[in-house]
Image (tube, rainbow, N blue to C red):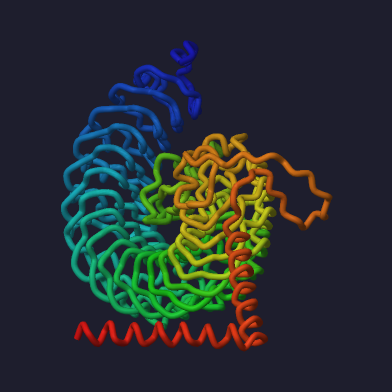
Amino acid sequence: MPNFLHYQHHLRLLRLSRCNIGGDFPNWLLENNSRLGEVYLDGNAFAGSLQLPFLPNLKALDISNNKIQGQLHPNIGSIFPNLVISTMSNNMLEGLLPSSFADMKNLECLDLSYNKLNGELPIGLAREGSKLYLLRLSNNMLKGEIFPVSGNINNFQYLYLDGNNFSDPIPQKLSTAPLQTLDLSYNNLSGNIPAWLGNISSLTSLALSKNHLKGHIPPDYCRLEGLEVLDLSDNSLVGVIPACFSAIRELKRVYLSKNKLQGIFNMFSNSDLKVLDLRYSNFSGSIPKWLGNLGITILLLKGNHLQGTIPTELCRASELRIMDLSHNNLSGPIPHCVGNIMQQESIIEVYPYSTSFGYPGFQTFGADTMIDVESSIKSSSAIMFLDSYAWVGTEFMTKHNTYSYEGSIVDYMSGIDLSCNQLSGELPKELSYLIQIHPLNLSYNHITGTIPSEFSNLQNIESLDLSYNNLIRRIPAQLLELTTLAVFSVAHKNLTGSTPQRAAQFATFNESSYEGNPFHCGLPLHISCMETKEIPISPLGPDCCEDDTGFLDIESFYISFLVAYANVVLVMVVVLSVNPYWRNIWFYYVESFMYSCYYFFASKM
């Protein structure tokens, strides 16, 4: 810390955000500058405990994203009596939440998320006349009742209690608050999902994921006409999605995965969906054609009972970046127009809801999210708090593992997973138009034909899985141009010839990438290709296949065998038709053989 700060007794505003300053928290800085009105020390490496002095003029305090330890002073409310905004998130604070926060009569925004606070919410946290409208206590170890009966929540607009151990029923008194965002996800809430939440007409974001809620999705939620984000994933909900959801035209993100919901989902056709996550449920029927009319960016339908073909209308979703249709019963060919998706640049928008709203299984995404506390010194009341914003996140199978992608990286992530279906037909060469794609998984289908050499255009691909299909012939040598490829699998097919040259990324792939191809040879397989002397042949044009390995081509072998067999049969038929002598001898031997067989079996009976 600069030494001159010891003597700045008239200092009103101090901003040393994200300077990576270490050492113990500078309690002396607050002691020597009692006129401070705004302090921003977020994004550093301060450690130690807080020994906070009396600062009657302090209105904004941001010490988030440090390594501060210990407990909060039980009388913090009297130490900072005029505090308006305070964020101490992403530290290592522990102990109980002081009830003296209620003494801060001007407090509007309080963020203590991502700490180790425990115990119950204080009874007087929000007293009568409280101005508190944003409370964020995400990812602590709080338990007990969500706001005791005496608590005043009439001003609450943003309430984040996700990532704690609350288990009591959700109190109905929340219906009296003008809530815009309510996040109670990642707790231990049980019982039926409350229908009265549909009475909070101001709600734009509702997150109840990762609890133990059961029952049907209440039709009362259809009254939430301004709802933009709905996350009820990872509960025990049953039944169908209410058809009246078609009235919620503002819906942009719907997370209903990992429940026991069933039926069809045509009720979103009139919405402005950007993200639809219905993974691991019991939805049936075909993929709706109207999805292609939306500006959808993430479509996750994995692990359902969807049937039929992939509709060509889906190709109109040019902003689609992540599509997971795996583990269904889809059949038919992959549409050739699939190259039309991912062609339009799309930025995943952000909305004011907590970081746990990320996409599923979405999980809690707090590590990369910061709350900015900004203020103006033009007047003592001109302090603006920017609510936390969470980027969209998603789970996606790539490189043979499931990864969670969250934050701004989702803007640059694109992938397709069609594995574990009944898809057939040949690989469309139009897949090579998806130059921004990172993982492409088409394994465990019935795809035939050859691997298109045009796949060499996938210059950003990291994982290509074509295993467990019916592909034939060689792996195109052009795939050596894929310098970003980290995982490659063509296992268990009918490929022939030698493996690609052990160069570039293909030098890193082991035997498992090629196993299960009995007529495949070359490193890293333990089957060596037969060496033959090269026979010069005349140039035949670009469409002719060249074979310089000398290894037996099983397809050519089958064809030549069938031709030879047909010739032998044809010669026998011609000879017996032309020569009566040989024909009589042939019929004599056939008749003798039949009598011998008859008497042999008769004697055994």
Look at 58% across and 37% down and name the residue there: 505
Image location of residue 228, percent across then percent down: 47, 66
Q: Is residue 46 left or right of residue 352?
A: left
Measured along the vertical axis of the image, is residue 414 above or below residue 512? below
Look at 49% across and 52% down and name the residue there: 517
Measured along the vertical axis of the image, is residue 462 above or below residue 427? above
Among all residues in the image, which is located at the extreme front?
A: 581
Q: Is residue 101 left or right of residue 11?
A: left
Q: Name the residue nearer the viewer: 240 or 112.
A: 240
User: Does the image show residue 7?
Assistant: yes
Q: Is residue 184 left or right of residue 571?
A: left
Image location of residue 599, percent across then percent down: 29, 86
Measured along the vertical axis of the image, is residue 223 above or below residue 462? below
Look at 23% across and 39% down and name the residue there: 117
Q: Name the residue nearer the viewer: 165 or 461.
A: 461
Image location of residue 578, percent across then percent down: 67, 86
Among all residues in the image, which is located at the extreme top?
A: 3
Look at 36% across and 48% down and name the residue there: 364
Measured along the vertical axis of the image, is residue 391 above or below residue 193? above
Q: Is residue 212 left or right of residue 256?
A: left
